[in-house]
Image (cartoon, rainbow, N blue to C red):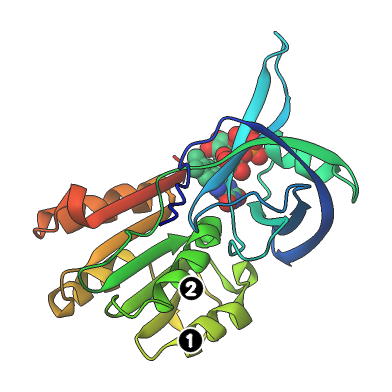
Amino acid sequence: MHFITLPLVSSRIHHARLLSRRTLARRTEEFVLGTEEPELTFRPGQFISVAVGTDAQANPILRSYSIASPPDRRGEIVLILRMVEGGVGTAFFDRLQPGDRLRFTGPMGFFVNELAHPGDVVYAATGTGIAPILPMAQEAAARAETGRILLEWGLRDEQDIFWQRELEALQRQSPRVRVRLFLSRPSAGWPGLRGHITGPILEELPRLSQPTFYLCGNGRMVEELKAALQARGVHRKRQIRTEVFFD
Ligand SMILES: Cc1cc2nc3c(=O)[nH]c(=O)nc-3n(C[C@H](O)[C@H](O)[C@H](O)COP(=O)(O)OP(=O)(O)OC[C@H]3O[C@@H](n4cnc5c(N)ncnc54)[C@H](O)[C@@H]3O)c2cc1C
């Protein structure tokens, strides 16, 4: 029998080139990297650590970015970046031209789907926190053992929305999938759901069977939701996985 072990942490330095860039939404950019290593493998949910500059002591400045593409897109890694005013990593990526080289370590990280889920799965994301969540949800939807798959995504307003087609495709992937988008500050005419994702997820809790939660995005949402779930009896270690992008 042949076993393949997949490292969840890799410190080897890899090189990639920028293949393309496009704007997805306000201050949200997609960067497609060619890794020069078609054999590079990862699990949905993992991230890479990119060298985006050097500090005054010539130490490398590193920024982490989740891989937004599925593993079967061999030789390519897609990143979705929130372009942050005055951000070091933001400035580095903003200057990159197609063909430019960059260095990264990884893929790494433990924010990946459990190998088997005992019941339902809830993915909760804010902003670009959707980047690792979509490939994770696609992976879960392809498995027979997982129960319902609920994806709850929180954004500020209409100008932040992207990946609508991708999320519709996920919704169609299985009748067990439900995707909901919430806007915290939509325009008056927004016909969709309003507010933050925390309340609606807590309302759903009594209807969930042995749920596993994956929370990703801004630290406040992650901490609030984690605390509220724990207060309602959800087991932090067994049932909640988190990835915080910024505080
Ligand atoms: C494991 C991991 C995976 C990550 N994956 C992604 C990803 O896929 N996409 C992504 O966009 N970011 C991701 N991040 C965040 C990313 O690493 C950077 O922190 C972020 O892009 C800002 O970096 P910067 O150098 O441009 O700004 P910095 O110079 O580091 O920060 C400038 C300021 O902006 C604030 N800030 C940082 N991020 C945001 C934000 N999203 N919205 C508003 N304010 C912010 C910071 O708190 C800081 O005050 C991830 C972080 C981690 C730890």
Left-right relation of 116 to 112: left
Q: Report the residue marked by disc 1.
A: 173
Image quadrant holding the N terminus, namely bottom left
Q: Which mark is residue 138?
A: 2
Residue at (59, 54) in percent of width and height: 67
Above or below, 163 against 247 in this view is below
* Disc 1 to disc 2: CB gap under 8 Å: yes
Above or below, 112 against 158 in this view is above
Residue most toward the left? 233
Q: Secondary structure at mark 2?
A: helix
Task: Rate crowding at label 1 as few (under 14), some (14 to 19) or many (20 or more) other CA atoms within 10 Å.
Answer: few
Identity of the amino acid at label 2? Answer: Gln
Disc 1 versus disc 2: distance between alpha carbons? 8 Å
Q: Nearer the viewer, residue 231 or 208?
A: 208
Identity of the amino acid at label 1? Answer: Gln
Q: Is mark 1 within 8 Å of ligand 1?
A: no
Q: Nearer the viewer, residue 191 or 104?
A: 104
Q: Which mark is residue 115?
A: none
The spot of residue 65 in percent (x, y) is: 59, 46
